[in-house]
Image (cartoon, rainbow, N blue to C red):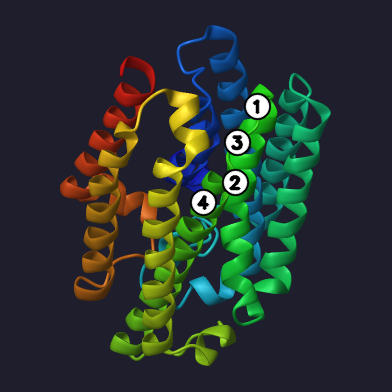
């Protein structure tokens, strides 16, 4: 059972929290009907994401065996057989589609799109330089869009753009950490796409995406539509938390060699976790109680 739980990568379910973004910014956070739909969407994404993680682990089994951390995964360590893993993946995917039937049909379409893209990523797309990080980033965007579809609201274009920059930032950070770790440990990787990257090149992209996050979020807080919708200009004060989060994350990635597991960083790094909590608290307070 512990091995099966680790196979699902429950820690990665934190990424599915992006599903709740439209719920917060649509001013429906304290309405039961909207909350129920958002929770269903979250559960559906947790199930389908675990299903595709299993497929990815099957494809990467041999490569993971020589990785200092990934070799501990249930499939790489042979704690669980490939046949069992495939069966679990099918059950998870079927359960996700079944749960999705309680939401608009378009949500099921997004779930299918996410699954197909991630499976294609596992087999082919992760070997294509630049495209690999965009596919990972697109997965985050689908989470936000699915959250809006689930509760039937329209979200700001600025939210979508900000999500794009955030997701690219996280994806590139992951690549940089993988590459830096491999170079430091002098490990021969089977991930040939990493040979087409350099730490310096990825640092340039990190700067661009970090700047994009700061600018797009700032413009969102100052947009006339935003001020009209929330009846306040105070959302601009939450920019300080966004900037601190960016700088702290860059510090951990560049100076501490972290970034390969964003979910673990959020839990293990107190300043990062506290900052996210304060940002969420301030956003909710300004939108709902200003």
Front: mark 4 or 3: 3
Work out how far the residue at label 1 is from the one at label 4, CA to CA, in angstroms: 17 Å
Q: Nearer the viewer, residue 287 or 120?
A: 287
Which residue is rendered at x = 61% and y = 72% of the image? 132
The residue that label 3 is drawn on is 155
Front: mark 2 or 1: 2
Residue 129 can be seen in this image: yes
Which circle marks residue 163 in the picture? Answer: 4
Q: The residue tagged with tag 1: helix, strand or loop?
A: loop
Query: Is residue 260 shown above or below 106?
Result: below
Q: Give the mark count.
A: 4
Mark 3 and mark 4 in contact (Cβ < 8 Å)? no
Query: Is residue 198 shown above or below 57?
Result: below
Which residue is rendered at x = 70% and y = 33% of the image? 96
Front: mark 4 or 2: 2
The residue that label 1 is drawn on is 153
The picture quadrant where one finds residue 33 is top right
Q: The residue tagged with tag 4: helix, strand or loop?
A: helix
Work out how far the residue at label 2 is from the one at label 1, CA to CA, in angstroms: 13 Å
């Amino acid at each position: 059972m512990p091995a099966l739980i680790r196979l699902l990568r429950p820690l990665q379910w934190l990424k599915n929290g992006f599903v709740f973004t439209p719920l917060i910014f649509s001013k429906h956070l304290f309405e039961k009907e909207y909350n129920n739909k958002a929770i269903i969407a979250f559960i559906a994404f947790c199930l389908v994401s675990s299903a595709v993680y299993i497929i990815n682990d099957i494809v990467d089994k041999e490569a993971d065996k020589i990785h200092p951390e990934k070799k501990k995964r249930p499939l790489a360590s042979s704690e669980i057989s490939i046949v069992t893993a495939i069966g679990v993946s099918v059950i998870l995917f079927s359960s996700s589609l079944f749960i999705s039937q309680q939401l608009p049909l378009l949500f099921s379409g997004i779930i299918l799109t996410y699954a197909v893209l991630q499976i294609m990523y596992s087999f082919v797309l992760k070997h294509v330089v630049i495209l690999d990080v965009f596919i990972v980033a697109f997965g985050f965007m689908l989470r936000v869009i699915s959250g809006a579809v689930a509760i039937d609201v329209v979200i700001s274009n600025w939210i979508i753009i900000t999500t794009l920059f955030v997701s690219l930032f996280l994806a590139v950070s992951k690549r940089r950490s993988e590459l830096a770790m491999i170079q430091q440990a002098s490990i021969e990787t089977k991930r040939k796409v990493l040979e087409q990257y350099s730490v310096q090149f990825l640092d340039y992209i990190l700067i661009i995406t970090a700047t994009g996050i700061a600018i797009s979020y700032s413009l969102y807080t100052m947009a006339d539509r935003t001020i009209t919708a929330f009846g306040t200009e105070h959302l601009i004060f939450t920019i300080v938390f966004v900037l601190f989060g960016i700088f702290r994350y860059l510090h951990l990635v560049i100076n501490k060699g972290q970034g390969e597991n964003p979910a673990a960083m959020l839990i293990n790094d107190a300043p990062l976790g506290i900052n996210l909590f304060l940002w969420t608290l301030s956003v909710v307070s300004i939108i709902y109680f200003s």
